[in-house]
Image: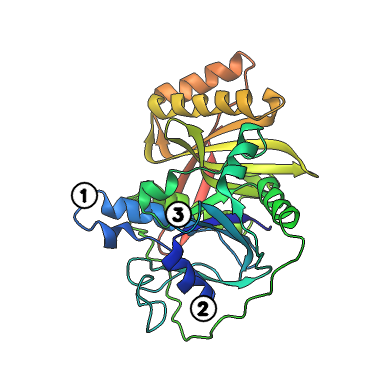
Amino acid sequence: MKKYRIFIVNDYTWEEHIKVGIAAINDPLNTHPNNRNAHAARQSAIAEISGIRPGDILFFNRMVSENHPPELLGVFEATSKPYFDPKPLFPEAKYVRENLPFRLKFKCINNYVNPIHIDEMWALRNKGKIWTIQQSRGDAVGVHACIGISKNEGKLIEKLFKINNIIEGQTIKFQPIDIEEKPLPLDKTTDSDGKLHYEASLMALLLDDFAEEKHKELFGEYDDFIPFVPTGARKEIDILLLKYNGEEILWYQILELKRDCFTMKELQRLIEYEKWLIRNKAENPLQVYPVAIAFNFDDDVINFVKGRTAYKERQIRLIKYHFDKKENLLFLEEIK
């Protein structure tokens, strides 16, 4: 299952990334250690990079500088799973150090001479062809972030590179270096009954499971998954699962996560996302499936969902989780 991701870089970090073929994103616990939400933000950053696997296609969004406008560079391919390395990227590295320890290796598919200006992407967004790319995610957890996009958008970007480059660039060969690929420091702390301490940890575990194509008995034969999908006004769908029929999206599953108890507040948010997707993207309301995933659910939520089903409206599925720390497995069970 090939996925598409965009890494945000600047002029300085890009030169170090491209020297050795390793991408990296920000660790909020390192950059903002005194922030009371730093530990939670760290888990959120880990979730951004979780789920990437060898074979996934990567682009790099080089932020605006005095030398150029914001632009996309590519096309590259992941050659490792994400890993943790708090050391300098290489001994002489000045910018990719302990501040950017969440990393993965990549190879160059095509180093196009002419980049794609981000303004061209926004023009396509206005036409509805680009819809998951956002500008604010990097600012939310640190400038260097990882953004998920749909397979169709990724293929469109590849097409734009070909349109913008009559002559293709030379493939880059990276400088070999020795690295230690430590596991990502995902916080899997739980209560005695299997409730995780961080919602982003639940998200990261799910994304890793989806990358391994797990839980299809619950979610069907999904072809793609995207974390942190923007819906406007700084709101984000936690995870969006997609099923394709050729180039057409057959269905969408909206996953709203809660590490503890799912309340009417979260349910209302899920319904808002459902309405947004029906209004802005889906061709038919039948394509959109709302799903709540939590450790438990308020009685009001359960009763509302039953009432909605009784009125023949689209079912909202309720799925309970618990994490078995001993087995290192996430278990999901639907409430019938």
Q: Distance between the residues labelled 3 and 2?
A: 24 Å
Residue 36's label in the rendered image is 1
> Residue type at mark 3?
Ala
- Foreground of the two, 332 or 255: 255
Answer few, some or many: residues within 10 Å of disc 3's Cα (few below 14, many 20 plus, some between 14 and 19).
many
Name the residue furthest right: 246
Can you say which quadrant of the picture contains the N terminus?
bottom right
Is residue 4 in view? yes
The x, y position of residue 199, in whole percent, is 38, 46
Q: Name the residue under label 3.
A: 47
Q: Which residue is drawn at 70% across and 46% down?
A: 152
SS category of the residue bearing label 3? helix
How many marks can you see?
A: 3
- Foreground of the two, 222 or 72: 72
Q: Name the residue under label 2.
A: 20
The x, y position of residue 325, in whole percent, is 40, 61
> Residue type at mark 1?
Arg
Name the residue furthest left: 34
> Residue type at mark 2?
Val
SS category of the residue bearing label 2? helix
Q: Residue at x 52, y 29 (%)?
A: 273
Q: In this view, does 55 lie above or below 189?
A: below
Name which of mark 3 and mark 2 comes first in the sequence.
2
Q: In this view, does 158 lie to the left or right of 304?
A: right
